[in-house]
């Protein structure tokens, strides 16, 4: 698979990679793998939430609001 970047994007990637002491291709590869892992976790969480909702398991709105506020603060 090949991904095309603009010259400006390639320069930015090169600067970030240089600062991290890694090859730009490895930087992009690692970022893509993190994206795939996060996508898998997100999709699993959504599936779990749907299954819980299908079973009638819900969180009260005020409890959810409190959890959301806590997430925003951390």
Image (cartoon, helix red, strand yellow):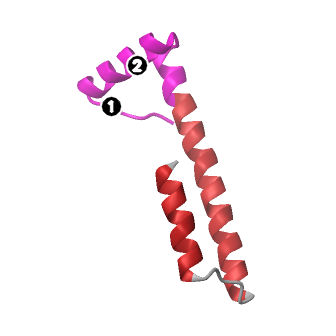
Where residue 61 appears, x then y in whole percent? 54, 81
Q: Residue at x 59, y 75 (%)?
A: 63
**Which label number is shown at residue 5?**
1
Q: Residue at x 54, y 21 (%)?
A: 26
Circle 2 residues within 10 Å: few <14, some 14–19, many ≥20: some
- In the rendered structure, does residue 26 fall within the stretch colored magenta? yes
Where residue 54 appears, x then y in whole percent? 70, 87
Q: Tell me if 13 is positioned left or right of 1 in this view.
A: left
Question: What's the CA distance linking mark 1 and mark 2?
Answer: 15 Å
Where residue 32 appears, x then y in whole percent? 53, 38
Residue named by callout 2: 16
By secondary structure, the bulk of the magenta-drawn segment is best described as helix
Q: Tell me if 30 is positioned left or right of 24 in this view.
A: right
Query: 68 or 12, which is in the foreground?
Result: 68
Q: Quadrant of residue 64?
A: bottom right
Vertical position of residue 5 compared to residue 57: above or below: above
Vertical position of residue 57 compared to residue 11: above or below: below
- Which is nearer the N-term, disc 1 or disc 2? 1
Label 2 residue SS: helix
Q: Tell me if 18 is positioned left or right of 64 in this view.
A: left
Query: 61 or 33, which is in the foreground?
Result: 61
Vertical position of residue 5 compared to residue 51: above or below: above
- Tell me the magenta residue range: 1-28
**Mark 1 or mark 2, whichever is nearer to me:** 2
Q: Are marks 1 and 2 in contact (CB under 8 Å)?
A: no
Q: Tell me if 65 is positioned left or right of 11 in this view.
A: right
Q: Residue at x 62, y 69 (%)?
A: 46
Q: Residue at x 47, y 55 (%)?
A: 72
Vertical position of residue 61 compared to residue 27: above or below: below
- In the rendered structure, does residue 7 fall within the stretch colored magenta? yes
């Amino acid at each position: 698979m090949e991904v095309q970047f603009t010259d400006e994007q390639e320069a930015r990637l090169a600067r970030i990679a240089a600062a991290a002491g890694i090859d730009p291709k490895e930087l992009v590869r690692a970022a893509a793998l993190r994206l795939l892992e996060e996508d898998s976790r997100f999709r699993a969480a959504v599936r779990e939430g749907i299954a819980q909702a299908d079973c009638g398991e819900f969180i009260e709105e005020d409890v959810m609001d409190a959890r959301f506020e806590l997430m925003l603060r951390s």
